[in-house]
């Protein structure tokens, strides 16, 4: 029998995850009426300098991130080749993988800014820097830039969004996944999501817009995929060629200069951690039982852009360039550089009021709750809310 979040026990309800701030996640659902303000009202509230893009400032942030990457790599390279006790390796490598994953994700975010052309005023420089950085992180820069722009134009629109589109009740029922029978399968689902979720999105458009008229699953490497327009053809090809060149470089280094173990320990595992953070952060930015998805007749760009959630990751907010705790502002002003997002967020919060979604729940707890409660939406309706079924 179907139930809702409010019928859980007091200690188990997702409504408990609030911070005391007057936002829509303090126990109430996000308002679905058209906001009493316009985008211009929000923009006028933000200091004008927040919209200025500085190549120098952005480059300094990138240099800081890359310095962290290379310092960690140098330490790992030394440990990899040194004759050290086993316990040193047992302690060092998990720490390296975790730290390099965090710093690597900060580089990923800079590349993401290049895709929004907020790195600087020159699109050419943005594309060159973004292509280099994202290729090094195994991301098809232009291909993802294009699909990500469509995500920003169609956020929380059931038939238009490109990422984290909710599963419907009928789809999960057909897959025999309408409910999780026990905690083991919940853990297994999260582990699967964090390890292969990002590659599955790139290769199979997993949790992306379902193109039912397309015989094959869309992917980010096929220039003829319905994700892209005919004019995107060469951008997709450039991204593919860049990745093939990078794969060739890594293969040569691992086969003729270093070793396969070097590749796995110093690059592959940290890259998996980068992907893990990417899935955690983006999943929690766009999934919550109190945030709706809309059918076409109810959706507007502003309502969709406001269906994003700022979350607190502690010190990682700074490491991740405030993509975590200022994501609402990012969706409203995607061309704004990250180093102005915190100031812009504070400027617009009084206007947003109940339309500002913030949750201070620790991210690991929010991840567990979201994966448990955000299971599906109904197959029909204009305003759709995440639902779940109780354990059996």
Image (tube, helix red, strand yellow):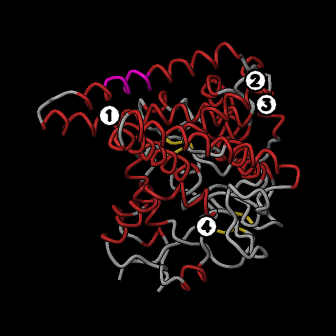
**Lower position in the chain sequence, tag 4 or tag 1:** 1
Residue position marked by numbered label 4 in the rendering: 166
Q: Nearer the viewer, residue 110 or 286?
A: 110
Q: Which residues are magenta?
A: 68-75
Q: State whether the magenta stretch is mostly helix, strand or loop.
A: helix
Q: Farthest residue in the front direction?
A: 256
Q: In the figure, 166 relative to 91: above or below?
A: below
Mark 3 closeness class: few <14, some 14–19, many ≥20 residues within 10 Å: some
List x then y, in percent, for residue 354.
64, 46
Instruction: Work out how far the residue at label 3 is from the one at label 4, CA to CA, in angstroms.
Output: 30 Å
**Lower position in the chain sequence, tag 3 or tag 1:** 3
Q: In the figure, 358 relative to 366: above or below?
A: above
Q: Does 74 appear in magenta? A: yes
Residue position marked by numbered label 2 in the rendering: 51
List x then y, in percent, for residue 232.
83, 49
Nearer mark to the viewer, of 1 and 2: 1
Assess whether mark 3 and mark 2 are in contact (beta carbons under 8 angstroms). no
Instruction: Work out how far the residue at label 4 is from the one at label 1, CA to CA, in angstroms.
Output: 35 Å
Q: Residue at x 55, y 42 (%)?
A: 248
């Amino acid at each position: 029998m179907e139930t809702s979040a409010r019928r859980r026990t007091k200690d188990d309800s997702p409504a408990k995850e609030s911070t005391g701030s007057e936002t829509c996640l303090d126990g109430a659902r996000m308002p679905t009426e058209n906001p009493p303000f316009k985008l211009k009202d929000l923009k006028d509230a933000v200091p004008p300098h927040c919209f200025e893009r500085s190549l120098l400032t952005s480059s300094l942030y990138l240099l800081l991130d890359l310095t962290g990457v290379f310092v960690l790599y140098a330490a790992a390279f030394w440990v990899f080749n040194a004759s050290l006790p086993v316990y040193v390796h047992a302690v060092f490598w998990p720490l390296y993988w975790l730290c390099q994953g965090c710093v690597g994700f900060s580089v990923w975010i800079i590349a993401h800014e290049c895709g929004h052309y907020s790195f600087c005023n020159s699109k050419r420089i943005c594309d060159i820097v973004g292509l280099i950085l994202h290729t090094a992180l195994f991301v098809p820069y232009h291909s993802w830039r294009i699909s990500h722009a469509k995500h920003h134009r169609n956020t929380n629109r059931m038939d238009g969004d490109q990422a984290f589109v909710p599963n419907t009740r009928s789809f999960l029922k057909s897959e025999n996944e309408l409910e999780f029978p026990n905690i083991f399968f919940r853990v297994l689902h999260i582990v699967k999501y964090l390890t292969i979720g990002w590659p599955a999105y790139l290769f199979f458009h997993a949790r992306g817009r379902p193109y039912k008229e397309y015989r094959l699953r869309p992917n980010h490497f096929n220039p003829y995929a319905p994700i892209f327009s005919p004019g995107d053809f060469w951008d997709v090809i450039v991204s593919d060629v860049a990745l093939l060149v990078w794969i060739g470089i890594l293969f040569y280094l691992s086969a003729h200069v270093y070793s396969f173990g070097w590749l796995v320990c110093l690059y592959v595992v940290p890259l998996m951690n980068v992907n893990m953070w990417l899935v955690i952060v983006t999943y929690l930015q766009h999934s919550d039982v109190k945030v709706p998805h809309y059918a076409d007749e109810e959706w507007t760009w502003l309502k969709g852009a406001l269906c994003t959630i700022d979350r607190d990751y502690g010190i990682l907010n700074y490491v991740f360039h405030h993509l975590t705790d200022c994501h609402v502002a990012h969706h409203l002003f995607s061309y704004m550089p990250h180093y102005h997002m915190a100031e812009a967020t504070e400027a617009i919060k009084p206007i947003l009021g109940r339309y500002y979604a913030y949750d201070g729940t620790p991210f690991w707890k929010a991840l567990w709750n979201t994966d448990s409660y955000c299971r599906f939406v109904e197959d029909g309706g204009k305003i759709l809310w995440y639902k779940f079924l109780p354990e059996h």
